């Protein structure tokens, strides 16, 4: 069935097929539940059977092996909107989160690797559900760059269309020659990093269950924890530094990891302008926060450095963990952390935010315009890693920056309608748009998003999905022009 040039039959089969492969992850907590005998098995089996039965119907449909651009946009938008609803069923059926809107919020937060939560007492949740929370981080972090393309080679060129809306343009171009091979290797690297972190966390004295969950959420830069006080619960410098290191690993371009896998040369991480800027920002922010926390008398120099390293990396990687309740820190430090969340990590990583490659391009564009003001006849070119960016790419970068800011402001205003203070409202909006999780004050590391009205939680859920899909893919579906031939 076609509507305005969009074959809905193709879209239906593609969406259901990917949802089925993703719903296989429900078997992870189901297996754990079966092993420990906590009686939660069917909470995960019911949603899986629902998706599986629909998939059996969709499997019978014969479709062409590629997607048009519009079909790809619609498919990926539906997947990111529908999978959180499937995931939410586990919380809802169990009764741990009886309000479906809240269950959807928790699921959207997990799948988009945001780390925002409505739970007031994480440790009271059944362990199998906590494992499911972390698994949604793992699934979302792995993402469609690897997950959808690796599992659905039958999509052909359609797979490339779908990747276009999950990865940056630079990543897309680099993957084109041998996408399946790169996807497979990145899949191995991603899970290899998780295993490495689990072993190090065990070495630091963290229990196995906790180590698995935190590793799932660290590499995904998702930030869900099984403890109410997050990483701070363990009171361990070693554990904090291990998690901080792997948050950096998760927030750099996974193509760097691919090239490292092929070359065994660490220099690949320091060649791109984007990585150089990211590491520079991390270093400067850590030094500044350490100095302010020390001078203002909050901690001694060692403690200030310890907490600054963790929280700066946590914010810049948009992860969402915490090693202490930082909401009482100096305003300057809090401002730095919020700015870092807004800027985000590196393209091709699991991190959210504006992304560093856009920051590099915007900075060069502003500098070029300043030079042109002094020399009107000047014609300048903007290069990224030696490659010239055309005007269409620059326009897209500026448009994204404007749209990203517009969304955070509008949602922040909507959150204020029920009397929420400005700091909580706008920090929460920035945290959800950048997929970084905790905000400030009421939604800080010691708080949660439970107090918002259901309609506000739904808006924040959509904002998280917008941020993960980088705004335009989801917006496009709701434009009248999208449905015209």
Image (spheres, helix red, strand yellow):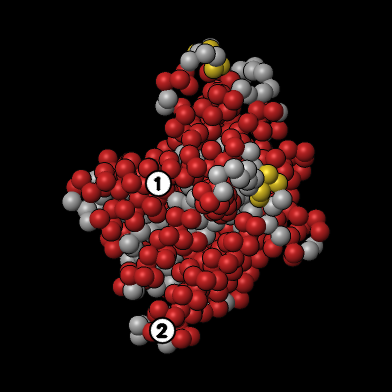
Can residue 29 be seen in this snapshot? Answer: no
Left or right, 63 with reference to 241: right
> Callout 1: few (<14), some (14-19), or many (20+) C-alpha neighbours within 10 Å?
some
Residue named by callout 1: 405
Nearer-the-camera pick, 276 or 371: 371
* Residue extending furthest toward the bottom: 300
| Res. 18 mark | none
* Residue extending furthest toward the right: 263
Nearer-the-camera pick, 348 or 30: 348
Mark 2 lies on a secondary structure that is helix
Residue named by callout 2: 294
Q: What residue appears at the point 42 percent right and 87 percent down from the top-left corner? A: 300
On the image, the x and y values in percent for residue 223 come to: 47, 59
Nearer-the-camera pick, 293 or 78: 293
On the image, the x and y values in percent for residue 246 come to: 59, 65
Q: What residue appears at the point 48 percent right and 51 percent down from the top-left corner? A: 353
* Disc 2 to disc 1, C-alpha distance: 33 Å
Q: Is residue 114 above or below residue 309?
A: above
Q: What residue appears at the point 61 percent right and 76 percent down from the top-left corner? A: 203
> Callout 2: few (<14), some (14-19), or many (20+) C-alpha neighbours within 10 Å?
some
* Residue extending furthest toward the left: 419
């Amino acid at each position: 069935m076609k509507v305005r040039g969009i074959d809905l039959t193709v879209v239906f089969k593609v969406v259901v097929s990917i949802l089925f492969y993703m719903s296989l992850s429900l078997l992870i907590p189901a297996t754990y539940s079966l092993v420990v005998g906590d009686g939660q098995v069917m909470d995960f089996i019911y949603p899986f059977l629902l998706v599986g039965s629909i998939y059996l119907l969709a499997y019978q449909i014969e479709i062409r092996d590629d997607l048009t651009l519009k079909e790809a946009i619609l498919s990926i938008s539906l997947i990111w909107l529908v999978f959180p609803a499937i995931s939410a069923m586990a919380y809802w059926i169990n009764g741990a989160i009886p309000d479906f809107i809240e269950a959807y919020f928790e699921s959207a937060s997990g799948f988009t690797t945001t780390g925002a939560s409505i739970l007031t007492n994480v440790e009271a949740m059944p362990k199998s559900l906590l494992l499911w929370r972390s698994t949604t981080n793992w699934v979302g972090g792995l993402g469609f760059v690897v997950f959808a393309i690796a599992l659905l080679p039958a999509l052909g060129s359609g797979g490339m269309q779908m990747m276009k809306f999950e990865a940056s343009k630079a990543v897309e171009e680099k993957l084109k020659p041998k996408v399946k091979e790169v996807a497979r290797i990145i899949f191995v690297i991603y899970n290899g990093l998780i295993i490495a972190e689990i072993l190090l966390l065990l070495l630091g004295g963290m229990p196995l269950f906790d180590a698995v969950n935190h590793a799932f959420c660290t590499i995904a830069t998702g930030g869900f924890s099984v403890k109410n006080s997050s990483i701070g619960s363990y009171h361990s410098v070693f554990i904090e530094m291990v998690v901080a290191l792997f948050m950096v690993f998760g927030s750099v371009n996974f193509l760097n990891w691919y090239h490292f896998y092929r070359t065994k040369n660490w220099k690949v991480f320091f060649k791109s302008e984007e990585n150089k800027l990211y590491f520079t920002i991390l270093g400067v922010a850590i030094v500044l926060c350490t100095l302010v926390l020390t001078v203002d008398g909050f901690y001694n120099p060692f403690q200030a450095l310890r907490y600054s390293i963790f929280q700066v990396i946590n914010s810049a990687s948009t992860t969402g963990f915490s090693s202490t309740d930082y909401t009482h820190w100096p305003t300057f430090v809090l401002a730095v952390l919020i700015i870092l969340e807004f800027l985000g990590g590196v393209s091709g990583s699991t991190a959210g935010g504006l992304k560093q490659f856009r920051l590099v391009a915007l900075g060069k564009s502003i500098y070029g315009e300043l030079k042109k003001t002094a020399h009107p006849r000047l014609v300048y070119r903007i290069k990224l890693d030696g490659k010239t960016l055309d005007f269409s790419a620059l326009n897209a970068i500026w448009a994204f920056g404007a749209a990203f800011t517009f969304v955070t402001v509008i949602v922040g205003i909507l959150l204020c309608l029920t009397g929420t203070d400005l700091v909580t409202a706008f920090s929460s909006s920035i945290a959800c748009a950048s997929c970084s999780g905790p905000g400030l004050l009421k939604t800080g590391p010691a708080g949660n998003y439970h107090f918002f009205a259901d309609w506000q939680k739904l808006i924040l859920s959509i904002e998280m999905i917008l941020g993960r899909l980088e705004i335009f893919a989801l917006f496009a579906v709701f434009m009248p022009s999208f449905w015209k031939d």
